[in-house]
Image (spheres, rainbow, N blue to C red):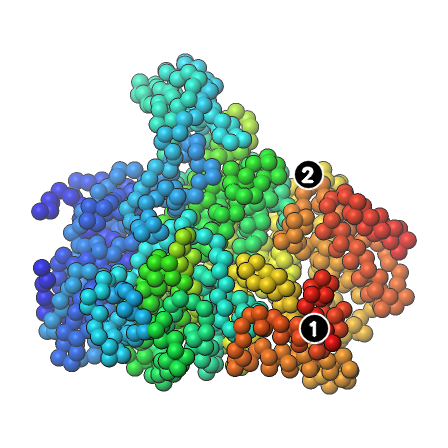
């Protein structure tokens, strides 16, 4: 039995209220107005007043418009037919392909995994980005943000990882994405021929703000089901700060007391409930999340990156177009380095970073006007090679190839005594001649 | 159709529901009620009463609830069930055993499952310790059962008031936690049956003991920085605030494994599930060096991770503390680690905001301070009715927003704890782990335990204070060197700085991944620190700064190598002899 209501009593921001009874908390409704039809979700019940957030926004919504409750929460179709498809923030296809009406539907924002059903992560996801694979490898089921100031090429990085990573399914969730960026993602995936394993949920900057809120949940609900079905899923989200900003807007419209810079007090829980979808299922697949978090004012103590940092398992800093080796951290890396990857991995990683730190020091010293020694020259040379061969975003290299190139680069600049690596590994890997 | 005789939901706002109760009904603050969602009962708790309107926080997702849905009040406060069989368990915030829940699709938590916290079938070998006719009161022992390595005393229900006579007592034998083991009668002739399991409302402190004692015995954590410089007392409280990535989790794992406590309770409150998984999967494989048993046998994990319902997060710390108090009543030395109290405070903030209470600083409710104080006050060392002692020590992790300690949770916690271990980003960036900053940290127990620490050495406390001063001096000299360079300071200042660096490197810093260095027992702490303080006292004579640096670096390396060697082993002795010879001749 579906009842329609035609009496909207209040419109504030993107929230409307209607007088209705028998409505479930969180259920979905369709709001039909002269200009368009939009989905809306119940966010509060008070007596016979029902508050809904209207995903397409309330511009043009009239008090006499029709509200039809659907009796279920937000759902998303699921099946292999999703692969290669592109959807908007309401979960409707926008690629001109067929509707997916026949597929079963999943509730989004489902309950969390029982912690005792998780296993300690043990899979390595190769991204072919040496700054990740060699120095801070991505581990299956990890959740890692990319912290970047506005203007950094974070979407380019994400697209590259999406194209190259060895995952079974890649799901992109675009939140407040510029239309150009969306087109670039799409073209990149098409050209790389990976579209058949990709699913995109795209909310562009010109779409209604409230629709942003759905994107991570849609992407993660689909990811979760693929994971349960045994697939290794990589979820790419950009940009979670836009997601947090949408939550802020709703909270303020609902007269919630803000906690910090206008964000609701539940910011941590709201972000965590999304990131915690990353999981390695015992006896099935996994979900790995890589999410861009832009830092307003390049400030890592801003509430969004700050709360994110507490939730996630490390972070990558993208600065001046490259992944910064200092500050970036994969907290789970010790679970795979030297265990899943080659035995020399940990040693070469530490040694290369230490020497690169030294080369930065030398650069600073020279910048202060000190004399340049022959040693300095070698460190500078190493610094340049390191940048060109490993940090440059254009580099596309598998892990083992990168490790070999690491040995080769060390040998070009240094004597084995200087690199601080165990002799047996030097004997085995140091390039001869 | 709906009956007018039931209490009904009138509003739903996230995890908060408002219920209109029937006229004659009596409700209690913090009473448990069940909201019926399609006949599935969802547990909730009364948090405000205004006339016939009652606000409740629901411990589960409220998706799908409707205005008009029925609510049944349970007539009791939110309680934990206490008795034998809790050790080694992994509970959620409401004490449901997580491994026994039925999961959707095999993995996902399903709403409305409440399972008894204690195994109802397992039989325990009960031996009575009283006889019929004895007079007892709450907290007295009726007998005991062996549980692992412990003698688990069966306690007269803590909720009983006044004195009671044992009118019936079961003989030695094996019983389940639901079997009646005794019957007690009071002056008014009221008889109560007693089983080995008893409920206790988690938000009320247990006070069935003779007196509280001043914490004056050390609780060894085997982390040198804590034990030597900022010692923790049995029954004391401490907080560990730190920015993300500064090593709170690793420090907590180390303490939970190596602390010399009988029972360790880990409350994972609103943190990553991944961390809990590591603990759950690794702890059973680790051996307790004191008992030779698995570390899991002395551990209880309460787990409400960040994506689990937020109201249950608020309850989880209280559940943990209640379990801790119960083991203290048994006469055990209990350590509770809560990670993180900030997430708990945020849960308070969320429900306060939904109730539209007037916010305090950073939107935390005005009662944050008193709630925090009341929580930490539940720790303590007590003398029980049989004159033995028990203790509950509480360490709370704090996750300050932006790593800034000026925020309300950190500040209000500092007012009530006895020790403060401040993690600093700069130390963790320099890979100086554990990243507890000695310049900002403090422990009130250093002076309070002067007596018992004096057993290590009569001068112990003054040595520690000397070393603390050395850090301050070393830091001042370091700051000066940053401005004027090494050339700008005198050789004595340089030596002081190098001494401070040496104590930092070989004593404060501890390698949690090294099998020897990760835990240092009491004997080794005494031995190594006594040697180190000799170095601090030693008046070195160096001609040049270069010589000073070289020889101090050499000495530091000897100490450094020594700390990785098995205590009293051959290699250890070799380094020690070499160090001693340097400290004789300089």
What number is the disc on residue A431?
1
Residue drawn where x is 47% and y is 41% of the image:
B300
Instruction: Indicate which label's residue lies in the foreground, 2 or 1.
Output: 1
Q: Position of residue B543 (x, y in %)?
A: 90, 66
Q: Which residue is mark 2?
A: B451
Considering the image in quadrants, where does the N terminus of chain A appear?
Answer: bottom left
Q: Position of residue A293 (x, y in %)?
A: 44, 72
User: In the orientation shown, which residue stands out farthest toward the front?
Assistant: A433
**Quadrant in the picture for residue A85:** bottom left
SS at badge 2: helix
- Judge the density around disc 2: few (<14), some (14-19), many (≥20) Cα neighbours within 10 Å: some
**Quadrant in the picture for residue B190:** top left
Q: Position of residue B426 (x, y in %)?
A: 61, 65
Position of residue B526 in the picture relative to residue B413 (left or right): right
Position of residue B304 in the picture relative to residue A203 (left or right): right
Q: Disc 1 sits on a residue from what chain?
A: A
- Judge the density around disc 1: few (<14), some (14-19), many (≥20) Cα neighbours within 10 Å: some
What number is the disc on residue A164?
none
Q: Disc 2 sits on a residue from what chain?
A: B
- Residue B152 vs A235, above or below: the answer is above
Residue A77 visible in the picture: yes
Residue A269 visible in the picture: no
Q: Please say if the residues under marks 2 and 1 sit with CB atoms less than 8 Å apart.
A: no
Q: Nearer the viewer, residue A155 or B506?
A: A155
Position of residue B63 in the picture relative to residue A119 (left or right): left
Q: Nearer the viewer, residue A374 or B84?
A: A374
């Amino acid at each position: 039995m579906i009842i329609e209501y035609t009496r909207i009593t209040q419109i504030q921001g993107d929230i409307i209220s209607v007088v209705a009874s028998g409505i479930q908390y969180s259920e979905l409704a369709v709001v039909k107005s002269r200009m368009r039809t939009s989905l809306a979700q119940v966010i509060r019940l008070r007596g016979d007043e029902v508050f809904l957030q209207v995903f397409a926004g309330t511009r043009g919504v009239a008090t006499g418009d029709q509200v039809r409750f659907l009796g279920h929460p937000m759902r998303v179709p699921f099946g292999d037919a999703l692969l290669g498809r592109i959807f908007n923030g309401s979960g409707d296809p926008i690629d001109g392909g067929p509707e997916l009406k026949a597929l079963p539907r999943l509730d989004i924002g489902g309950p969390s995994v029982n912690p005792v059903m998780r296993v300690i992560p043990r899979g390595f996801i190769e991204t072919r980005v040496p700054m990740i694979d060699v120095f801070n490898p991505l581990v299956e089921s990890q959740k890692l943000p990319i912290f970047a100031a506005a203007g950094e090429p974070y979407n380019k990085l994400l697209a590259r990882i999406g194209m190259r990573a060895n995952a079974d399914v890649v799901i992109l969730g675009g939140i407040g994405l510029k239309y150009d960026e969306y087109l670039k993602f799409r073209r990149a995936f098409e050209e790389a021929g990976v579209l058949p394993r990709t699913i995109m949920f795209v909310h562009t900057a010109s779409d209604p703000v409230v629709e942003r809120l759905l994107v991570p949940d849609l992407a993660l609900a689909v990811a979760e089901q693929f994971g349960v079905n045994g697939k290794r899923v990589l979820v790419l989200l950009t940009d979670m700060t836009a997601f947090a900003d949408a939550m802020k807007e709703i909270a303020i419209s609902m007269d919630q007391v803000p906690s910090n810079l206008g964000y609701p007090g539940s910011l941590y829980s709201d972000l965590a409930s999304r990131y915690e979808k990353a999981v390695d299922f015992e006896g099935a697949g996994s979900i790995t999340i890589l999410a861009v978090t832009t830092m307003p004012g390049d400030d890592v103590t801003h509430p969004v990156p700050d709360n994110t940092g507490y939730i996630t398992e490390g972070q990558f800093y993208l600065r001046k177009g490259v992944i910064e080796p200092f500050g970036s951290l994969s907290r789970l890396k010790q679970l795979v380095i030297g265990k899943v990857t080659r035995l020399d991995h940990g040693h070469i990683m530490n040694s290369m970073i230490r020497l690169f730190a030294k080369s930065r020091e030398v650069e600073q010293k020279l910048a202060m006007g000190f004399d340049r020694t022959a040693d300095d020259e070698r460190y500078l040379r190493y610094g340049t090679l390191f940048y060109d061969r490993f940090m440059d975003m254009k580099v596309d290299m598998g892990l083992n190839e990168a490790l070999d190139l690491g040995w080769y680069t060390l040998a070009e600049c240094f004597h084995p005594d200087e690199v601080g690596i165990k002799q047996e590994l030097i004997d085995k890997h140091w390039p001869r001649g | 159709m709906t009956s007018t005789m039931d209490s009904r939901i009138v509003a739903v706002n996230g995890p908060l529901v408002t219920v209109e109760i029937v006229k004659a009904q009596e409700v209690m603050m913090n009473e448990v009620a069940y909201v019926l969602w399609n006949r599935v009962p969802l547990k909730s708790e009364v948090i405000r009463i205004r006339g016939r309107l009652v606000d409740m926080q629901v411990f589960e997702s409220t998706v799908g609830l409707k205005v008009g849905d029925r609510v049944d009040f349970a007539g009791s406060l939110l309680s934990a069930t206490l008795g034998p069989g809790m050790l080694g368990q992994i509970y959620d915030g409401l004490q449901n055993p997580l491994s026994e829940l039925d999961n959707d699709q095999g993995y996902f938590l399903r709403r409305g499952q409440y399972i008894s916290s204690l195994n109802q079938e397992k039989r325990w070998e009960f031996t009575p310790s009283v006889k019929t006719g004895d007079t007892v009161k709450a907290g007295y022992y009726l007998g005991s059962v062996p549980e692992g390595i412990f003698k688990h005393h069966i306690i007269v229900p803590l909720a009983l008031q006044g004195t009671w006579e044992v009118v019936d007592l079961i003989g030695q034998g094996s019983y389940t936690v639901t079997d009646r083991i005794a019957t007690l009668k009071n002056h008014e002739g009221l008889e109560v049956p007693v089983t080995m399991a008893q409920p206790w409302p988690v938000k009320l402190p247990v006070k069935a003991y003779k007196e509280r004692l001043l914490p004056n015995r050390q609780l060894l954590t085997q982390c040198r920085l804590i034990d030597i410089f900022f010692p923790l007392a049995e029954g004391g409280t401490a907080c560990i605030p730190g920015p993300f990535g500064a090593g709170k989790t690793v420090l907590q794992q180390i303490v939970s494994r190596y602390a010399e406590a009988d029972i360790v309770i880990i409350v994972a409150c609103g943190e990553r599930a991944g961390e809990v998984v590591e603990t759950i999967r690794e702890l059973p494989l680790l051996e307790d060096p004191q008992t030779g048993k698995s570390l899991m046998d002395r551990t209880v994990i309460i787990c409400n991770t960040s994506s689990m319902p937020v109201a249950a997060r608020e309850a989880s710390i209280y559940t943990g503390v209640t379990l801790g108090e119960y083991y203290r009543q048994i006469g055990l030395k209990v350590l509770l680690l809560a990670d993180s109290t900030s997430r708990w405070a945020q849960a308070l903030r969320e429900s306060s905001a939904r109730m539209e209470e007037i916010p305090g600083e950073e939107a935390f409710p005005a009662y944050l301070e008193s709630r925090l104080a009341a929580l930490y006050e539940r720790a303590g060392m007590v003398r029980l009715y049989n004159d033995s002692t028990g203790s509950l020590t509480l360490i709370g992790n704090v996750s300050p927003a932006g790593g800034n300690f000026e925020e309300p949770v950190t500040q209000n916690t500092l007012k009530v704890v006895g020790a403060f271990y401040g993690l600093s980003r700069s130390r963790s960036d320099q890979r100086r782990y554990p990243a507890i900053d000695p310049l900002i940290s403090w422990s009130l127990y250093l002076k309070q335990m002067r007596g018992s620490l004096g057993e290590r050495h009569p001068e112990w406390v003054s040595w520690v204070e000397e070393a603390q001063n050395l850090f301050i001096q070393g830091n001042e000299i370091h700051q000066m060197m940053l401005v004027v360079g090494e050339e700008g300071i005198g050789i004595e200042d340089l030596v002081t700085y190098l001494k401070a660096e040496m104590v930092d490197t070989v004593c404060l810093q501890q390698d949690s991944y090294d099998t020897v260095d990760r835990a240092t027992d009491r004997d080794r702490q005494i031995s190594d620190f006594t040697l180190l303080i000799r170095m601090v006292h030693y008046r070195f004579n160096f001609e040049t700064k270069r010589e000073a640096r070289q020889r101090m670096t050499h000495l530091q390396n000897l100490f450094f190598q020594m700390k990785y060697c098995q205590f009293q082993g051959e290699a250890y002795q070799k380094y020690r002899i070499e160090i001693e010879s340097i400290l004789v001749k300089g």
